Amino acid sequence: MNYKTSVLRFPKDVATAAELIRQGECVALKTETVYGLAADATNEDAIGRVFEAKGRPADNPLIVHIESVDDMSHWAKDIPDIAYKLADVFWPGPLSLLLKKQHWVSDKVTGGHDTIVLRAPASENFMSLIRATKKGLAAPSANKYKFISPTCAEHVLRSLDGRIAAVVDGGQSGVGIESTILDITTPIPTIVRPGPIDDLMIEQALSEPVKYADNLGVTVPGSAKQHYQPNTPVQLLSTEALSKMQLRADEGVISHTADSVNVKSKNCNVLRLPRDPAKYSAHFYSSLYQLDMQSLRCIYLEETPSDNSWLAINNRIGRVVAR
């Protein structure tokens, strides 16, 4: 694998990106959540290139991105009525639905499972490529396996330059973390990956209970214990512990409270993110990238609140600091 990775621009280079997809190549581009590494989900060679570029285990399934609910039955079977209700409310958007797959769908896409994860993204960048190729596009995050998910083209290049055909620079992703994955093959709809769409939002749409998975019964994207990790070691600390520290010049901090860090050194790398969970999420990965590029000894993360509105970001933080 030895590519000269092209940097394309949205929207003028969509046709070029579409032609690369038709040739079986991988192209990174923006979704509303993070940048995805897109490939033709019907082309097994192209899917193989996704796994090779990322160094991703073959049993870890990919999300297939489609244009609309009208394409759902092409990829999935035994579709429950609630799938259409959810799509009507949340698509296009950051909700992925786990369904039973059609018999023809390649096991390479689904990691050998009899299920498939589908999503209609809200990003015009990604939708333009789906329309131009007339394909369902498999697209995990555009980074090496277990590394920080990218939210801009620069992040993609840091991880995959020379490993993929092209990246389409469409600016910054707005949501900042990956989509919610909801398993609707079970009697009670089950969130198997927390994300921007939470249980209360789904329950309101369905008028029925929704639960979070205690233990994942099926492998889904983002389920690895260690994930979203920078090269720099990351340690989680309480607000009180951080406030008592005298930070060294080779240490960084990501905090969300004004008084969490006693900053006496001008060389300290302290990034303060908003206290609102959605706004925090939008900047979380980019903050990790920013500090990871500075050859620090350690990055300290301030513990975030434990209430339900922070569940998705706490899921990511737990995987970032896991050892």
Image: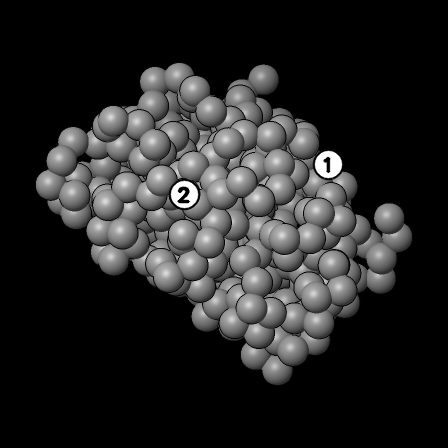
Name the kind of residue labelled 1 in the image: Gly
Give the residue at x 21% y 32%.
210
* Left-right relation of 205 to 98: left
How far across and how far down the image is residue 10, in percent? 58, 75
Please determine whether, in this image, residue 8 is positioned above or below residue 273: below
Marks counted in the figure total: 2
Rendered location of residue 237, percent (x, y): 43, 23
Q: Amino acid at mark 2?
A: Lys
Q: Nearer the viewer, residue 151 or 256?
A: 151
Could you say whether the residue bearing mark 2 is in a helix, strand or loop?
strand
Residue 55's label in the rendered image is: 1
Quadrant containing the C terminus is top right
Q: Residue at x 70, y 75 (%)?
A: 16
- Quarter-of-image position of residue 208: top left
Horizontally, residue 116 falls left or right of residue 49, namely: left
On the question of residue 229 being in view, the answer is: no
Q: Are marks 1 and 2 in contact (CB under 8 Å)?
A: no
Q: Which residue is mark 2?
A: 77
The residue located at (40%, 33%) in the rendering is: 193
Q: Compare residues 12 and 151 and report the one nearer the observer.
A: 12
Residue 48 position, x and y percent, is: 73, 44
Q: Name the residue nearer the viewer: 27 or 298.
A: 27
Q: Residue 9 has which mark?
A: none
Q: Is residue 203 left or right of residue 24?
A: left
User: Dot 1: within a 10 Å radius of its alpha carbon, few (fewer than 14), some, or many (20 or more) residues?
Assistant: few
Compare marks 1 and 2 and give the one earlier in the sequence. Answer: 1
Residue 306 vs 270, above or below: the answer is above
Tell me the distance, in whole angstroms, between the alpha carbons under discs 1 and 2.
30 Å
